[in-house]
Image (spheres, helix red, strand yellow):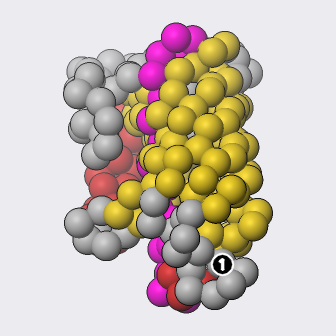
Amino acid sequence: MHVLKRDRIRQLSALAASAATLIALGLTPTAQAAPAAPAASQQAALLECPGYETTSYKPGLTLLPRQVALSASGAIGPCLGVPLDHTNGTITFTGNGQLSCTTGNSTGNGRIDWKNDQTSSSTFDFTAAVGVRPAGDSVLVLTGEIKSGDFQSSTIIIEIVLAAAPAQSLDCLTPDGLDTSSGAVNLQIV
């Protein structure tokens, strides 16, 4: 699965570089539909952004669900889609709910600060669910609505790998649990 994610990031990076080259030459690239989200939507994405983030869990995630507060921050980009001025940014969110390393649900809110002075930050509310993908990766999928700023009223989907490293997975077996995870994130706005 990690190889597939690296390939996906490489593909997105190559597309972004091609689009930047065409724009620099004064040519407009033809619009292509972004690949569908692995989790939720059948609609074509307006914007898709790979990235990297760090999430903290208090108390840590264990094998049994318990009330957990989560907070995350990270960077996204290069983003592909329309409009072209939303190429990268930072993302933060907080939430809480009954979570474990393999199951659970939470709610919360977040913000994307786009790295372009001509754009407005996007704030969103979300519901999240933990699930295990067929390859064995435990993921947290956030789905919600952008409440203000750019892309207002659009759906946002964020997929986060919870335990990317084997050592992180082992933390789920300890009484303190997995208190921090860092890794790939994929964000879509549809």
Q: Residues within 10 Å of mark 1 (few under 14, many from 20)?
A: many
Residue 158 shown in magenta: yes
Can the viewer see residue 111 in this picture?
Answer: yes
Which quadrant of the structure image shows residue 152? top right
- Magenta region: which residues? 150-168
Residue 124, compared with residue 162, is above or below; it is: above
> 61 left or right of 82?
right
Q: Position of residue 180 (x, y in %)?
A: 68, 70
Horizontal and vertical percent for residue 53?
Answer: 62, 57
Q: Is residue 186 above or below residue 134?
A: above
Q: Is residue 89 visible?
A: no
Q: How many marks?
A: 1
Quadrant showing the C terminus: top left
- Residue topped by disc 1: 177
Q: In this view of the protein, which residue sits in the foreground, 178 or 29?
A: 178
Amino acid type at circle 1 is Gly
Q: In the image, 78: left or right of 41?
A: right
Which residue corresponds to the image point at 62% horizontal and 27% vertical from the top-left? 125
